[in-house]
Amino acid sequence: MPHADAGPAGIAAPERNSRAFPDVAGITADSGGRYAWTLPFALLSFSFLAPPPTSVPMQVATWMLLPSGTAAGTWTALVLAVAGTAAYAVAGPGR
């Protein structure tokens, strides 16, 4: 059952973020385990320090803080989820 704040795709913002954010780590996991934490940490830090998302590029950059009905947040999460899953499936974990 979708949350009360679910957007047009029926996915609420916390659910969207919890599905896409681990895949951000998957994008960097194949580059080496030592620095795999840097991209998720930088993305999370930037989203809290960025100015208000008034333009589409800023909405894409701060997708984790957008409400669930925002198309830029939903599409960014979807692209990151697919890219992270594909990168991890092709390259596997770094050694």
Image: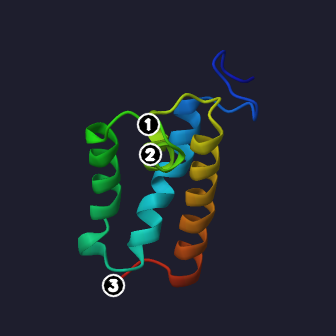
Residue 95, relative to residue 2: is it above or below?
below
Q: Residue at x 51, y 83 (%)?
A: 91
User: Mark 1 or 3, which is nearer the eye?
Assistant: 1
Badge number at residue 76: none
Name the quadrant of the C terminus.
bottom left
List x then y, in percent, for residue 88: 52, 73
Where's residue 30, x and y in %? 42, 78
Q: Which disc is residue 53 wearing?
A: 1
Amino acid type of the residue that numbered disc 3 sits on in the rendered structure = Arg
Residue 44 appears at what percent x and percent y?
33, 46
Residue linked to disc 3: 95
- Between the C-alphas of marks 1 and 3, the distance is 37 Å
The residue positioned 46% from the left and 69% from the top of the image is 27
Please give the name of the residue rendered at 56% of the width and 46% of the height, measured from the top-left corner. Answer: 19
User: Dot 2, crowdedness within 10 Å: few (<14), some or many (≥20)?
Assistant: some
Q: Are marks 2 and 3 in contact (CB under 8 Å)?
A: no
Specify the quadrant of the image occupied by residue 68: top right
Q: Quadrant of residue 16?
A: top right
Residue nearest the viewer, comparing 69 with 89 = 69
User: Closer to the camera, 86 or 72?
Assistant: 72
Mark 1 and mark 2 in contact (Cβ < 8 Å)?
yes
The residue under label 2 is 58
Earlier-in-chain disc, 1 versus 3: 1
Question: Residue most toward the top?
Answer: 4
Mark 3 element type: loop
Q: Secondary structure under badge 1?
A: loop
